[in-house]
Image (cartoon, rainbow, N blue to C red):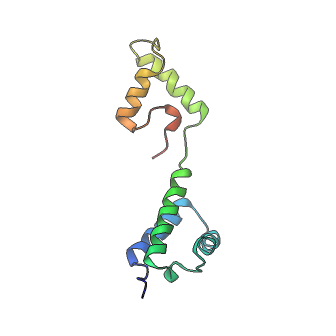
Amino acid sequence: MIMATISNQQKRQIHALVSALGWSDTFYRSFLHAFCGANSCTELTEEQASALIAELLDAQDDCSPKATAKQVSYIKYLWLSVDYDQGNYGDKHLASFLARRFNVDRPEKLTRK
């Protein structure tokens, strides 16, 4: 049984993800070798490439820059000036606003995306 080789679209996606992660070529090739025993993505099968892409997407999610404690504190401070209940209900209104606008429920989960 012949395994399908990596597609050009998968190659482009892998290289775009590696670039977005800011990995050096040496680090990328070491990761590739450790992950699937290949020295180049051209040696991968379509299934291996899909698994690698999923892994790179997970790594990208883990590396998303988060709001710092100082930024979160400042956001909460600014929120008090527009919250009509002046924080009497905790962060309930802020959480609602963040969920509507940014799909997060706490300012600590905000990213730069």
Q: Using the image, determine if residue 11 lies above or below residue 86.
A: below
Residue 101 shows in the view: yes
Q: Is residue 54 left or right of residue 96?
A: right
Looking at the image, which is closer to me, 25 or 88? 88
Work out which residue is located at the far front of the displayed protein and give it: 1
Residue in the picture at 43% in, 79% down: 6
Residue in the picture at 36% in, 35% down: 101
Work out which residue is located at the far left of the displayed protein and give it: 100
Q: Where is residue 91 drawn, in percent x and y?
A: 47, 21
Residue in the picture at 49% in, 82% down: 42
Task: Give the position of the N terminus as an image quadrant.
Answer: bottom left
Q: Using the image, determine if residue 73 lies above or below residue 51.
A: above
Q: How many marks?
A: 0
Looking at the image, which is closer to me, 38 or 79? 38
Q: Using the image, determine if residue 27 lies above or below residue 3.
A: above
Picture quarter containing residue 97?
top left
Picture quarter containing residue 2?
bottom left
Residue in the picture at 48% in, 59% down: 57
Q: Is residue 49 left or right of residue 99?
A: right
Q: Is residue 76 left or right of residue 1?
A: right
Work out which residue is located at the far bottom of the displayed protein and give it: 1
Q: Where is residue 76 drawn, in percent x and y?
A: 51, 24
Residue 11 shows in the view: no
Looking at the image, which is closer to me, 11 or 46? 46
Q: Where is residue 47 drawn, in percent x and y?
A: 45, 74
